[in-house]
Amino acid sequence: MAKKEIYDAASIAVLEGLEAVRKRPGMYIGSTSRKGLNHLIYEIVDNAVDEHLAGFCSLIKVVLERDGSCTVTDNGRGIPVDMHEKGVPAARLVFTTLHAGGKFDNSAYKTSGGLHGVGSSVVNALSAWMDVRISRDGYIHHDRYEAGNPVLELEDGMLPRIGRTKETGSCIQFLPDEEIFEKIRFSATEVKSRLHETAYLNPALTIHFEDLRGEEPEIIEYHEPEGIVGYIKDLNQNTQVLHDPVYLKGESEGIVVEAAFQFVNEFRENVLGFCNNIYNAEGGTHLTGFKTVFTSVMNTYAREIGVLKDKDQNFTGTDIRNGMTAVISIKHPEPRFEGQTKTKLDNPDASRATAKVIGEQMVLFFDRNLDTLKTVLSCAEKSAKIRKAEEKAKTNLLVKPKYSFDSNGKLANCEKKDPALCEIFIVEGDSAGGSAKTARDRSYQAILPIRGKILNVEKASIDKVLANAEIKTMINAFGCGFSEGYGNDFDITKLRYDKIVIMADADVDGAHISTLLLTLFYRFMPELIYEGHVYIAMPPLYKVMPNKGAEEYLYDDKALEKYRKTHKSGSFTLQRYKGLGEMDADQLWETTLNPETRRMKRVEIEDARLASNVTEILMGSDVPPRKAFIYDHAADAELDV
Ligand code: TSJ
């Protein structure tokens, strides 16, 4: 009975074909925003990585072409081109049948999992055109598709051959379809970050990247023979490290487990999980297994060497991991994923296998490296001391006095109480804050003006962060508390506003303030971002008042350029907004507050690597890369009405 249902579901999926993918792209790639767009590249590249894992491919080339398309080439065996069912060459089936992958896939560890790994046919379906060149059996075989449909005639049932070659490999070029995607410009920053990550996870692989779209081509080679140890060094590159990275590896229950870790002199933990080369943003069983065994082994050592006395309580897991950077990478033959974004590893055997391998290997390591053991335990000791002091401070801050921020005149709350209807605007500057208070719809919009630069939380320890008046105000206004390594007191269900909107000037200082706020949310209230509550207002840069016709707001220089092309100079007056403070209440209402007309961008965290890089770039003291980042991303911002 159950078997039959599965069979039926599978055959229906095949029958539906690629048209279904074009009708509901979101179901297959998550979204048609920039995130979904970049995903097309990863989807194709993952096939070449599978070929690498199978032992036949050492080089992958990814080129962002001038015409907006992407070319991915590998030096593997070449996708099989021999005749398959119903007189269609195997390679054509790969690109025209949903879930065709499994049939030819003989690699033990498929990269696909959850939302990922939807297959090359989905990429084909969502491309205006796709061009396929396969080198094998002495020939270059060619195929081409438009909106997923093959456009080349077969020759005696075979793909047309367009040349001879001694090499083997696969080369796929595709242009995302403008009819499907909101934007079709790939983000080089994100693609590079993902390729670099893939290189770290596959130390024998070389990935060659080219971006030919700008004036100067950008060419980078990613090859990381040190593997995840190199990844750890990269993640810790601007921090004070306390010992050499430790690398552990083993196998249990058919699952290969690798881990690398290194402690740094910072108040944070950064533990990243990967299964079959896919980053698990929501963690999962491999991380649980790792954390549990790490805590228990370190507590045992602490008693053995007398760091903990009989009367002392055990260190908590977060005490022990404070300062830790770790990468856990496992290879699982049948990964299952769950969670909001299907990025949380769910297999119970992954927890067992990780705990067993790490437990055994870390004892072998620490027995021979007592200095490192002492370093790690002294971190835990320090953390436990601070935790105890801060538990007191926290009780004083959040439990005893119920801060009323109305009383210090700052938060102008809204009248409605239903969080689903309420919005809070965090406004930079008192004068803009004042206008916003006048302009808002007080029934459901709250205004919280903040002043100056907020504390840099990346560098600060928690007690300093909590001593900051602006931050206290914000935490109390949101209503959910906050979480840091020490226990998790954050409760998203208590959130008092559905939308938290950061409203800062459209200049570099404004971008800096926004970034500091985002770092704060990311570190202490990450669920606000994961659950999509955080927005950035996008105030206009210009207002144009034509001699005849209606006035308009222009949100960026591109829009102004376009306006100038269609309107003669002299036929309109141009007003440039320098800051939010310059707008009167009506203008502020129209451009940033009124849901009918305002523009804002929902904040997404793409992946941990990118986020931690961003923080590093922005919080480091070297100013030039910071500016470059802010401008890059200002141009990237997606308008969300
Ligand atoms: F390069 C690439 F990323 F664009 C890409 C590479 C894209 C796609 C959709 C597939 C591939 C790819 C597939 N590279 N290498 C392969 N290998 C096979 O499909 C293959 C070759 C030979 C055999 C065999 O058993 O002989 C089996 C497989 C799966």
Image (cartoon, helix red, strand yellow):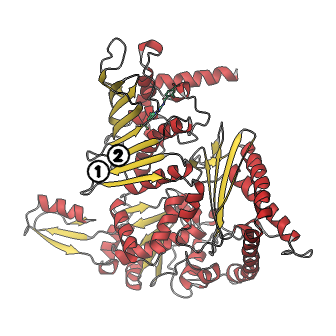
Q: Quadrant of the C terminus?
A: bottom left
- Does residue 297 appear anywhere in the picture? yes
Sequence order check, earlier mark of 2 and 1: 2
Q: Could you say whether the residue bearing mark 1 is in a helix, strand or loop?
A: loop
Amino acid carrying label 2: it is Val
View extreme (bottom): residue = 408
Tag on residue 212?
A: 1
Question: 528 or 437, which lies in front?
Answer: 528
Label count reads: 2
Q: Quadrant of the N terminus?
A: top right
Percent x, y of residue 386: 72, 80
Point 66% across, 36% down: residue: 334
Left or right: residue 124 versus residue 521 is left
Question: 239 or 11, which lies in front?
Answer: 239
Tag 2 residue: 63
Q: Does 281 sit above or below residue 542? A: above
Percent x, y of residue 417: 57, 68
Question: 117 or 452, which lies in front?
Answer: 117
- Marks 2 & 1, CB-CB < 8 Å contact: yes
Point 28% across, 52% down: residue: 213
Amino acid carrying label 1: it is Leu
View extreme (right): residue = 310
Where residue 567 sits, quadrant-wise, is bottom left
